[in-house]
Image: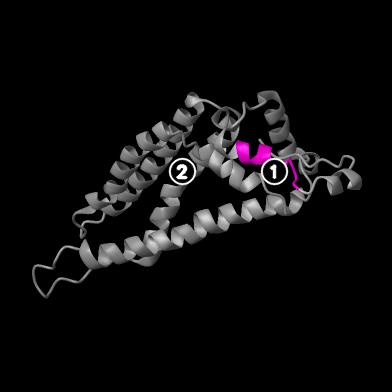
Amino acid sequence: MLPTASKGRSSSSSSSSRPNNPMLLPYLRRIIKWQQMDIEYTFWQMLHLCTSPKVVYDHSTAHTLLVIFSVLFFHFILTGVFLATFCWFLTNSYLREEAPNSYVVEQRVEWMYAFDVHCNSFFPLFVLLYVIHYFLSPLLVAHGFIPVLLSNLLFMVGASYYHYLNFLGYDVLPFLERTTFFLYPIGIVIVLSPILILSGFNPSSYFMNMYFSRQI
């Protein structure tokens, strides 16, 4: 699952006699063809990531902090601010019911409410794609059609449930109309998922590789 830093012997004479490093070719092959995972070794890595990260790879503290910060700041806060701002603008500009007369007090969606809807919708997504996904990752990143299928289904369910809860958060407001607009992304996810499955794209492998294959 994760790269293990090796502090083995290095020979300056052999490196000088080979100007083109042959180690580049295996890495290029891994990009287009994932090798079968060693499930037992992967669980060993996952255990030590929680108890002793330095056993798994060098500079683990900095890398782990980077992963935690990126998940907290980018996935939750930054993305949440963007989505909340978008939904706040959309609801107030296009989805409010027109007041029947001038004596009715105009109602608007507050930005903090929009961000609160995001927080409520993000929690099940977090459980599915961060907690459950973590324990299933040895299976999901393995080579083959079944891991690709399961990984895409897990991401499809997580994304769809997020948008469904987002819809419920705005649908309860009586002064909004056409709130079914917030269900449209679910249709996009459902249509896109079979395409990704048939193309062999594994989102679990992609994100695990993005976060854990490079060392700081």
Taking 176 as reference, is 131 above or below it? above
Taking 164 as reference, is 72 above or below it? below
Q: Which residues are magenta?
A: 20-29
Closer-to-camera residue (144/173)? 144
- N-terminal label among 1 and 2: 1
- Residue with the mark numbered 2: 125
Q: Quadrant of residue 52?
A: top right
Q: Quadrant of residue 56?
A: top right
Q: Secondary structure at mark 2?
A: helix
- Residue with the mark numbered 1: 24
Would residue 157 be found to the left or right of residue 207 on screen? left
Most common SS among magenta residues: helix
Taking 199 as reference, is 121 above or below it? below
Q: Secondary structure at mark 1?
A: helix
Residue kind at label 2, given as amino acid type? Leu
Q: Nearer the viewer, mark 1 or mark 2?
A: 1
Residue 31 x/y as whole percent: 58, 40
Real-space CA distance between mark 1 and mark 2, rounded to the nearest whole angstrom = 37 Å
Q: Residue at x 31, y 39 (%)?
A: 191
Report the quarter where the C terminus lies. bottom right
